[in-house]
Image (cartoon, helix red, strand yellow):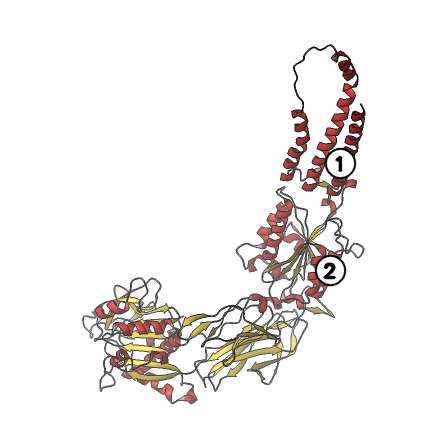
């Protein structure tokens, strides 16, 4: 009948209620009888009134102990089931938890209302049904990428906060995170009893993706949390505020990508926009357009079949290096959030490549960088072919040691058959690579292995080299045998050109006669090996702070292998190696709404501001961090500032802006919805709920309703205290007269 009697406050209340009894018992003094004749008359009178006084004292004791016990019981706030015969004495206090789905799909407009506006109005009705005078409590949770508990306890405060929320976010709903917040509330409210009487309402559009366990982003699925809620006796009412159709019509831009990374000005690539029709009916005449740096290009009309995705291609090239913005737009429909998708791309300036020649020769074929330089040289003049990706300069090891070569003006440094460098030079190269440059080292006859290991390799990984150099290995006879490249990672950008079967022999069939054995560090990546008995590494890569180091176990000149003798091998290999070594991602991939972001600035940032898609500005709060090489890490942009899709930009006086894009999750455009039957069968703790007009704003908890006795108990305790005071006063007057 009663619940909550295991509350810890009851134990203390029982102890306090015993205090008057204990005082009474302690005051019962023991006397040694002494005969005295005059006391016979007093004793006779006492015997006549003893029983009446004992009853009067007992009543006074019960009133005092009862008042304390009732107050302790009221503080414990016990409940009565609705089936209890004492239920008429209780008040049905409501503990209401309202979870509002604020995901992007809630922006779908059915006639004049959106799914979110209906959820907002329904939440307001629920809060209006609460009463402060009976102790009702309210929790308001907004469910997006994260769960945000905005109000707890005070119903009027929950209503006021709800009024300040005007629209959905562009995030994706994390159902598990929202239910985890509900579970936390239920456990706290159960007060250790193992059951909770909270009333939970989730206002959502029933998007199928939201309830799909396979799309859970966290470590715990929403089904596991629902199991825990069921054990606590909590039923989750799901109210459908979405459109009437189970699969509303919607077309969206689900991807915007480049066919390949832009290597420099004048290089043409393709922009690929993926358009998806999420409905069961084909859609014709969809207008799609591409904006490049804010300038709209001519639109196209596209027909898309039912449940079909198609790609629309746009040729793209830039005449100037720098950061550029792309935005693909569709004509508006009922869900506007997925009708546009943005992308920030970087057109890098030509890479500054410094070739250090360790073995110069008048014969180009015998020069350690002769054919390498020739392979890169066309990039200087043939801009019409888009080959102006490199700005090449040649240097001697002496220029490097003396400091004549300014490493801050170098993006890629290639050491070819260099015997060895001064320790200070290796330290300077290490600092430059750590700041974001790249080093490529190729071997040769002049390489002094001990000198390189002593000055550039450290077993703990703090050195420049990604591997320790070993002994030189050579074939017994070049006429009788050679080694070939095997176990090559053709998915790596450096070797991606040779991934096609027709080009693969250009890499795998090249003869190798000599190499330096290498022992790579644990964090180094072996891109290719040789087919010798030891499967010796041929090409190794390692990240060094913000830069990279590539180590080629053989030469790039035609002295130890035949790579340079085959232009169809040499040109794509060195181009891809240099390009991927030197090009760093200077722009971020598109963020999802609600994700945090930190940008890097190429100079000291002053008064950095965030410019949002709605053109509002907000200063970035926090301190910038110096990364080295003149690069600064700006303060973090919090997820609360990236909840809307579109193009953002970080603006600083006297510096170039730093744009980034926020795009909605493509799955948000798929508005396929669960039917009520599917939801009811999804989990025992979930139930579809449709309030009647007559009960809106005044729902009760149903058959499991539990009423609280605390008000009745407090009133009874007050009555006991008043009765005790009156009775004690009456006894005092009577006994003083007597």
Q: Position of residue 455 (x, y in %)?
A: 26, 69
Placement of 204 over or under 582, stated as above or below: above
Q: Which residue is mark 1?
A: 721
| Residue 272 shows in the view | yes
Label 2 packing within 10 angstroms: few (<14), some (14-19), many (20+): some
Q: Are marks 2 and 1 in contact (CB under 8 Å)?
A: no
Q: How far across and down, in percent of the image, does residue 2 sit?
A: 70, 38
**Residue ID for mark 2:** 124
Q: Quadrant of residue 73?
A: top right
Q: On the rendered structure, is 491 left or right of 658?
A: left
Visible residue check, residue 7: no
Note whether 716 is above or below 505 in the view shown. above
Label 1: how many Cα within 10 Å (few below 14, some 14–19, many 20+): some
Give whichever of 412, 688 is nearer the camera.
412
Rendering quarter of residue 329? bottom right
Q: Quadrant of residue 89?
A: top right
Could you tell which of marks 2 and 1 lies nearer the N-terminus?
Answer: 2
Query: Does dot 1 land on a helix, a strand or a loop?
Result: helix
Q: Residue at x 38, y 89 (%)?
A: 381
Q: CA distance from mark 2 to mark 1?
A: 42 Å
Name the residue located 48 percent from the left edge and 87 percent from the top edge.
319
**Residue 366: x, y in percent?**
23, 82
Q: Is residue 202 left or right of residue 516?
A: right
Position of residue 408 relative to residue 189, above or below, is below
The image quadrant where one finds the N terminus is top right
The tag on residue 211 is none
Instruction: Judge depth for marks 2 and 1 and give the one in front.
Output: 1
């Amino acid at each position: 009948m009663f619940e909550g009697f295991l509350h810890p406050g009851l134990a203390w209340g029982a102890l306090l209620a015993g205090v008057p009894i204990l005082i009474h018992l302690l005051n019962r003094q023991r006397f040694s009888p002494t005969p005295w004749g005059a006391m016979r008359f007093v004793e006779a009178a006492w015997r006549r009134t003893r029983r009446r006084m004992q009853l009067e004292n007992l009543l006074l004791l019960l009133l005092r102990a009862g008042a304390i016990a009732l107050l302790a019981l009221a503080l414990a706030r016990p409940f009565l089931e609705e089936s209890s015969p004492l239920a008429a004495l209780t008040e049905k206090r409501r503990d209401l938890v309202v979870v509002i789905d604020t995901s992007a799909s809630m922006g779908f407009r059915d006639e004049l209302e959106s799914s979110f506006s209906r959820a907002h109005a329904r939440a307001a009705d629920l809060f209006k049904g609460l009463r402060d005078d009976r102790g009702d409590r309210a929790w308001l949770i907004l469910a997006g990428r994260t769960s945000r508990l905005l109000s707890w306890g005070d119903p009027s405060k929950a209503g006021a906060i709800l009024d300040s929320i005007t629209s959905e976010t562009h995030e994706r709903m994390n159902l598990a995170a929202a239910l985890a917040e509900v579970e936390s509330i239920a456990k706290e409210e159960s007060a250790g009893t193992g059951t909770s009487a909270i009333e939970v309402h989730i206002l959502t559009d029933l998007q199928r993706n939201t309830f799909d366990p396979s799309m859970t982003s966290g470590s715990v699925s929403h089904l596991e949390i629902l199991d825990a809620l069921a054990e606590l006796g909590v039923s989750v009412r799901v109210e459908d505020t979405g459109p009437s159709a189970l699969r509303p019509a919607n077309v969206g831009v689900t991807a915007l990508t480049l066919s390949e990374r832009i290597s420099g000005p004048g290089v043409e690539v393709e922009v690929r926009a993926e358009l998806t029709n999420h409905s069961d009916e084909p859609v014709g005449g969809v207008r799609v357009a591409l904006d490049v740096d804010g300038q709209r290009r001519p639109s196209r009309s596209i027909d898309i079949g039912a449940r079909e995705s198609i790609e629309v291609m746009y040729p793209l090239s830039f005449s100037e290096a720098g950061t550029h913005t792309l935005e693909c737009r569709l004509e508006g429909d009922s869900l506007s959030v997925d009708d546009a998708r943005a992308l920030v791309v970087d057109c890098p300036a030509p890479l500054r490549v410094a070739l250090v020649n360790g073995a110069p020769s008048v014969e180009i074929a015998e020069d350690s960088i002769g054919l390498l330089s020739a392979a890169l040289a066309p990039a200087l003049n043939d801009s019409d072919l888009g080959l102006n990706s490199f700005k090449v300069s040649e240097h001697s090891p002496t220029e490097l040691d003396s400091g004549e070569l300014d490493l801050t003006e170098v993006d890629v440094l290639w050491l070819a058959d260099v015997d060895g460098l001064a320790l200070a030079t290796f330290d300077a190269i290490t600092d430059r690579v750590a700041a974001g440059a790249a080093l490529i080292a190729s071997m040769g006859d002049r390489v002094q292995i001990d000198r390189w290991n002593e000055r550039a390799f450290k077993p703990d990984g703090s050195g420049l080299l990604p591997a320790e150099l070993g002994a030189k290995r050579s074939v017994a006879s070049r006429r009788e045998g050679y080694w070939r490249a095997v176990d090559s990672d053709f998915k790596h950008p450096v070797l991606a050109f040779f991934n096609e079967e027709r080009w693969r022999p250009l890499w795998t069939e090249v003869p190798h006669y000599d190499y330096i054995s290498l022992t790579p560090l644990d964090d180094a990546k072996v891109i290719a090996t040789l087919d010798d008995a030891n499967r010796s590494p041929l090409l190794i890569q390692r990240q060094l702070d913000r830069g990279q180091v590539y180590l080629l176990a053989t030469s790039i000149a035609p002295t130890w292998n035949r790579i340079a003798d085959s232009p169809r091998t040499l040109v794509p290999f060195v181009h891809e190696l240099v390009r991927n070594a030197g090009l760093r991602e200077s722009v971020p991939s598109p963020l999802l709404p609600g994700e945090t972001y930190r940008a890097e600035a190429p100079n000291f940032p002053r008064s950095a501001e965030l410019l949002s898609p709605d053109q509002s500005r907000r200063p970035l709060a926090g301190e910038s961090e110096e990364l080295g090489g003149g690069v600064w890490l700006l303060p973090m942009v919090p997820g609360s500032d990236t909840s809307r899709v579109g193009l953002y930009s970080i603006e600083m006086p006297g510096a170039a802006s730093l744009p980034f894009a926020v795009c909605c999750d493509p799955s948000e455009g798929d508005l396929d919805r669960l039917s009520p039957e599917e939801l009811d069968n999804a989990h025992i703790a979930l139930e579809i709920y449709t309030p009647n007009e007559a009960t809106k704003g005044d729902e009760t908890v149903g058959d499991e309703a539990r009423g609280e006795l605390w008000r009745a108990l407090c009133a009874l305790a007050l009555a006991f205290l008043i009765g005790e005071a009156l009775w004690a006063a009456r006894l005092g007057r009577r006994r003083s007269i007597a």
